[in-house]
Image (tube, rainbow, N blue to C red):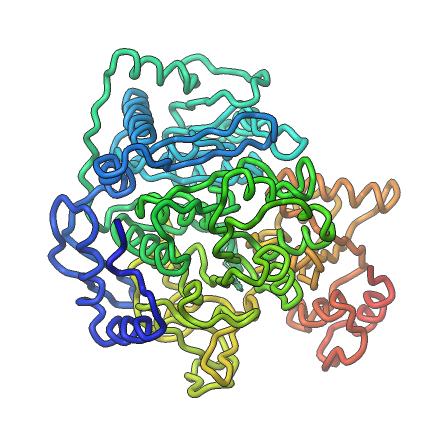
Amino acid sequence: MSYPYQIKSFEQYQTAYQKSIEQPEEFWEDIAQHFTWQKKWDKVLDWEFNTPKVEWFKGGKLNITENCLDRWVATQPETPAIIWESNNPHEASRNITYKALHQKVCAFAQVLKNNGAKKGDRICIYMPMVPELTIAVLACARIGAVHSVIFAGFSAQSISDRVQDAQCNIVITADGAYRGNKTIPLKSVMDEALVNCPSVEKVIVLTRTQMAVSMLNGRDCWWDEEMKLVEEKNDYSDKAEVMDAEDMLFILYTSGSTGKPKGVVHTCAGYMVWTNYTFVNVFQYEPGQIHFCTADIGWVTGHSYIIYGPLSAGATSLMFEGIPTYPDAGRFWEVVEKHHVNILYTAPTAIRSLMGFGKSPIEGKNLSSLKILGTVGEPINEEAWHWYDENIGKENCPIVDTWWQTETGGILISNLAGVTPSKPTFATLPIPGVQPLLVDESGNELLGNAVSGNLCIKFPWPGMLRTTYGDHERCRQTYFSTYQNLYFTGDGCLRDEDGYYRITGRVDDVLNVSGHRLGTAELENAINMHSGVIESAIVGYPHDIKGQGIYAYVVFGEIHTDEEHTKQNILKTVSKIIGAIAKPDKIQFVSGLPKTRSGKIMRRILRKVAEGETENLGDTSTLLDPSIVAEIIKGRL
Ligand code: WTA
């Protein structure tokens, strides 16, 4: 088996790119024909950004799981689809072949049906990183239900918002999750969330930690018992639901600059083609290789490069339940050695945190199986890039710096490993089909090279979002209204003298903390929920490991106990409202915020102070109370 559309040289890349721009429909049609369809499409592309309307392969009928499972069961049933490594290094790893995965997915699809699930239903998944999570995701896709995976670190409140927004009728969860030396009580967090979610009729609970959980009669049932019912009686079929190319595949919630997280919607065919095409080309995957993406399936990287990209390519995907520093900072390298990992795809924040432990965790580990390294989620700094290259890749593995977003479905700008040139800290060149464009503040296109501006995309690619769940207008406003006829990414970007792209970070009010997106408005809302808080403002500041840290300026009523205690209480509230990932790194109490006479917070000043810049704060004369700035500088943490 090989991939006819795998690009093998720089010249081939240039030819493919050119064709993808000049004849996009022919280009994608050629690629799409290599998948399993129940009926071919009527029209390759129909689009209009101002609405927005984007439709790929309209009229085509397929099921993505037939592409991820059945076609490999037919040709390579014994190839491992998933290799699973536990959080606990002493627990046996699991090896699940395509045949076994197919069987489990079909059986669990029947469990879902037995519990009332049908095509179009929204199903919430809140699970640890165990193979059953992948099985649950694929079983939803198998029956045409829309999965909404929620990262297992989110709080009850966050779950509840998401479940209500999507009106989910079924939840799949587990008793608990292991994460490093912690045990997280998933089911009890879910129980708290579901108090406010009347749409949920069934909760299916996997046993992972064997911690005590409450099981509500009539609503809650055990994964194992339900599976036994269908497996023992052999009471399930392997027939997949017939889906339209543009039927919804999943919703994934992500933060933006305003309001609550929105449900980014991806559809079946375009997303499948995109994750597969980018997986095969960016990582230059070769059959038999072991691909280890360290992300959690709760984020888009896990959806696209643990599940759909690799499995649709018949690859072996390694799923790791744990964290890079447990039981020690050598764990990733131990996993690489143990499973002979060929491709390692991780986040700059993980690299920076491991750098801090020095070289001893790497010593004695055999990393010679590694062929290709990748990074995703945030800009990588030069130092981390070189450390990764020298210590992990032994200067022998191309590094792909892959830029993309939840909304883009898969990678948009990246070098192709060993095929197109890499350049430290640069995502480099667009994937075929991607037409990036830089604009200035007023939306004028910046032509030529050696320019910086806001990154937009001017033509649809198959993997792009189609809408935000339940609110199409929000999708239009967020992504398609800032600049006419363009998709706006929210990122700033430099195109250098060679035409290579380097993403410089968000230009909107979104922070990127350890590769996780958090909106400042969302964070402020959470802090403001804390009793005693009058007002708050959040800004990001450079953080050695996390990339960006969260700096909170808080106006508090009367502090009854000491400040430290109050800070701890605020952190607790933020954990409750969003989750531990959203806890501010620094909280500074202030008597007021710098505001203009019209009441607008001057974030520019707050950002500069948080970054350590206490002079050159720019014009402060329009402030209502300029003296507040001196106080803020004085109290800086
Ligand atoms: C940032 C993660 C620089 C960017 C796949 C984007 C990056 C946001 C890179 C999306 C990269 C992602 N270099 N920045 N290689 N990859 N980003 O939705 O700001 O969680 O807009 O998707 O992460 O984050 P999201």
Q: Is residue 144 visible?
A: no
| Camera-side residue of 54 and 287 | 287
Q: Is residue 194 left or right of residue 287?
A: right
| Camera-side residue of 347 and 57 | 347
Q: Is residue 421 left or right of residue 584?
A: left
Q: Where 49 falls versus 206 (above or below)?
A: below
Please tell me which residue is depicted at 41% across the width and 70% down the height of the picture. 420
| Camera-side residue of 214 and 463 | 463
In the rendered image, which quarter contains the C terminus? bottom right
Please tell me which residue is depicted at 37% across the width and 39% down the height of the picture. 147
Q: Where 368 falls versus 217 (above or below)?
A: below
Q: Is residue 506 visible?
A: yes
Q: Is residue 135 left or right of residue 256?
A: left
Q: Where 536 falls versus 207 (above or below)?
A: below
Give residue 545's position: percent from left, percent from top: 69, 56
Please tell me which residue is depicted at 42% across the width and 23% down the height of the picture. 204
Residue most toward the bottom? 448
Q: Is residue 331 left or right of residue 428?
A: right
Q: Where 527 falls versus 107 (above or below)?
A: below
| Camera-side residue of 553 and 23 | 23
The tally of labels here is 0
Give residue 387's position: percent from left, percent from top: 65, 61
Q: Quadrant of residue 406?
A: bottom left
Give residue 484's position: percent from left, percent from top: 36, 75
Give residue 114's position: percent from left, percent from top: 29, 20
Q: Quadrant of residue 240?
A: top left
